[in-house]
Amino acid sequence: MRVLVTGGAGFIGSYIVRTLASGGHEPVVLDALLPSAHGPAGSGVPASGDLPPGVRTVVADVRDREAVAGALRGVGAVCHQAAMVGLGKDFADAPEYVGCNDLGTAVLLAGMAEAGIRDLVLAGSMVVYGEGRYDCPRHGTVRPGPRAVADLDAGRFEPHCPRCGAELVPGLVTEEAPGDPRNVYAATKLAQEHLAAAWTRATGGRAVALRYHNVYGPGMPRDTPYAGVASYFRSALARGEAPQVFEDGNQRRDFVHVRDVAAANAVALAALGEREPGTFDAYNTGSGTPHTIGEMAWALSSAHGGPDPVVTGEYRLGDVRHVTADSRRLREELGWKPGTEFAQGMREFATAPLRSSGEPDEAGDR
Ligand SMILES: NC(=O)c1ccc[n+]([C@@H]2O[C@H](COP(=O)([O-])OP(=O)(O)OC[C@H]3O[C@@H](n4cnc5c(N)ncnc54)[C@H](O)[C@@H]3O)[C@@H](O)[C@H]2O)c1
Ligand SMILES: [Zn+2]
């Protein structure tokens, strides 16, 4: 089947393209090669250099109706990965996040409706849940609000029970947990899901959102405000600097390897064919084994041969303390199984190349 992969020149998208091609599909890429992801315009052909030979690549913005219509020709399904990611520089980035992620999704879905394309795999995100699941010894499952600046300044990073102030035990978030986006990017990812669900109802389409956890692996973009924490640590090590661990390093996340995320897209695509028209389903996509940010910094730094991480106590407003997914549904319903476990994946990632931003790198690593 011909499958359009939007954002197919990006970190995750390029793995999906290769996975689909080796699975006998014909991937087509639509990607604007955003400078925030690929470095300044004119800095060379970025990640698309990694695409399998012969993959048709449309360099265009997903908000461009005509380009989208052209890219959708002959296509049977879409894997929608194109998005601006990360926390961004400051709130001034908000219109561009909303434009790329939500207007872009609306234009894509309208194009699919017009072309009669019914199957969509959406790159969702764990960020839609905000703070993860917490249990209070007295009040059961509770939903702590955003952490107060005064607490963060004082190094009180753990959220407390909103009813009695007790310490909470972090747990695994399931797909039923309500959306609670805590920053602009998170709000745009949740809106993408709402748009996709509305599209399935209006058109009889079928959509699966894979709510990726923290994805890492070779080819991850460098440390820009638009990248993830694994890339910050990895980039610091490449420069011979200590990874700077924010808060106290005990923030819990689930690090899932990019190859496993690409495989999840392939199984989701295959499963769409058996779904009822007009259905939208979300699946957490994580390794199933939570780790702390501090553990990740140490794993990378020891595999790299130092320097040791430094815990700085700094924080970023908009970051959540703990969020870890329960990815059982994806395993049980779609038969997906992550193939790369933490220690092995981090060892590989510690020395694997990051994606070139187009800028020459001091450490000569690309
Ligand atoms: N990396 C993670 O840890 C993570 C976690 C959860 C969800 N996701 C989601 O996965 C998807 C892929 O992320 P990634 O980590 O590969 O990021 P990335 O920046 O490497 O890739 C995104 C790609 O989308 C393209 N793009 C962005 N806006 C576009 C637009 N308006 N028109 C056309 N192309 C556009 C960029 O040029 C880039 O190539 C995103 O939807 C992201 O929200 C990523
Ligand atoms: Zn309580």
Image (cartoon, grey):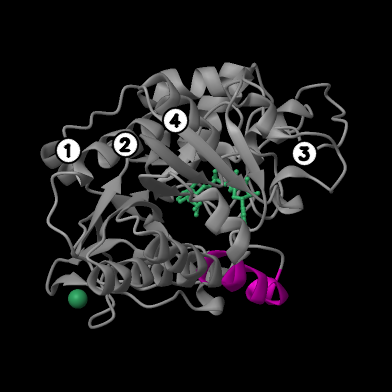
Residue found 51% across the figure and 68% down from its top: 107
Tell me residue 211's x, y (percent): 34, 52
- The one nearer the camera, 312 or 201, is 201
Residue found 66% across the figure and 33% down from its top: 48
Amino acid carrying mark 3 in the image: Ser
How far apart marks 1 and 4 lie (CA) works out to 22 Å
Q: Earlier in the sequence, mark 4 or mark 2?
A: 4
**Mark 1 burial class by Cα count in 10 Å: few <14, some 14-19, many 20+:** some
Residue 338 horizontal side relative to residue 150, left or right: left
Looking at the image, can residue 83 be seen?
no
Mark 4 vs ligand 1: CB under 8 Å? no
Q: Which residues are magenta?
A: 90-102
Tell me residue 85's x, y (percent): 58, 56
Q: Earlier in the sequence, mark 3 or mark 2?
A: 2
Looking at the image, can residue 299 be seen?
yes
Q: Earlier in the sequence, mark 3 or mark 4?
A: 4
Residue ID for mark 4:
26
Tell me residue 331's x, y (percent): 17, 36
Asked whether 39 falls inside the magenta stretch, the response is: no
Residue 275 horizontal side relative to residue 291, left or right: left
Q: Is there CB contact under 8 Å for labels 1 and 2?
A: yes
Amino acid carrying mark 2 in the image: Ala
Residue 192 horizontal side relative to residue 13, left or right: left
**Mark 2 burial class by Cα count in 10 Å: few <14, some 14-19, many 20+:** many
How far apart marks 3 and 1 lie (CA) works out to 35 Å
Residue ID for mark 2:
264
Residue ID for mark 1:
334
Q: Earlier in the sequence, mark 1 or mark 4?
A: 4
Residue found 23% across the figure and 72% down from its top: 201
How far apart marks 4 and 2 lie (CA) works out to 17 Å
